[in-house]
Amino acid sequence: MKVKALVSFSGARLGMTLGETREVPDDVAKEFIKIGHVEAVEEKKSTKAAMLDAAKNYAASYTGLTLDDLDEREEVSIAVLTLVSDMWDNRQTTLTGARSVNRLVDSILFMHSVNLLPGSDGG
C-alpha cells in the first residue's frame, strides 16, 4: 500500500520523514495508519489512461456499441487513439478558436453507429 508520512518517525518496522511517500506492506501500513503516523495515498489514474477511457466511452456513446463490440472493430481503435491524441494536444484549460470533432474520428465512428437506425418497433 502506498502511504504518506504525517510526522517524522523511526522504528524497527518502518521509519519515514514528514511528507515522504512510499510503498509499504499492507499490514505495516494499516498499523501506522491506525496510530496516525501515515495516511494511505490513493493511486491516481494517469492522465493518458483517463484520456483513453474517456475516448473509449465517447466512441461507445457515439456509436451505440458496447466497449466489447468496439474492441472487435480494428478501425475503431484508430479513432480512439486519434481522440486520445487530440485530447493530449489540447490539454489547456482555455480553448481558443473553433473546435470540432476530428473528421477521421467522425467518419470511422459514424460507419459503426448502430444507434441512428430506427428500432424494430418502427420508432
Image (cartoon, grey):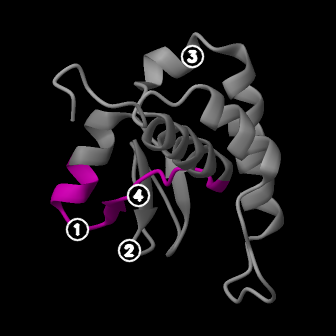
* Image quarter hosting the N terminus: top left
Q: Quadrant of residue 80?
A: top right
**In the rendering, which numbered label is found on residue 41?**
4
Q: Is residue 10 visible?
A: no
Q: Mark 3 or mark 2, which is nearer the start of the sequence?
A: 2
Q: Which residues are magenta?
A: 31-47
> Closer to the camera, 115 or 120?
120
Q: Secondary structure at mark 3?
A: helix
The residue labelled by disc 1 is 36
Q: Position of residue 102 (x, y in %)?
A: 78, 54
Q: Mark 4 or mark 2, which is nearer the start of the sequence?
A: 2
Q: Reply above or below: 8 against 26.
A: below
- The magenta stretch spans residue 36: yes
**In the rendering, which numbered label is found on residue 71?**
3
Kindly report which numbered mark, 2 or 3, lies closer to the viewer in this rendering: 3
At 39% from the left and 42% from the top, the residue drawn is 13
- Horizontal relation, residue 66 to residue 100: left or right: left
Q: Mark 3 or mark 4, which is nearer the start of the sequence?
A: 4
Q: How many marks?
A: 4
The residue labelled by disc 2 is 6
Q: Secondary structure at mark 2?
A: loop
Label 2 to label 3: alpha-carbon separation:
44 Å
Q: Mark 2 or mark 1, which is nearer the start of the sequence?
A: 2
Q: Reply above or below: 42 against 74.
A: below
- The magenta stretch spans residue 78: no
At 34% from the left and 63% from the top, the residue drawn is 38
Q: Reply above or below: 120 against 60.
A: above
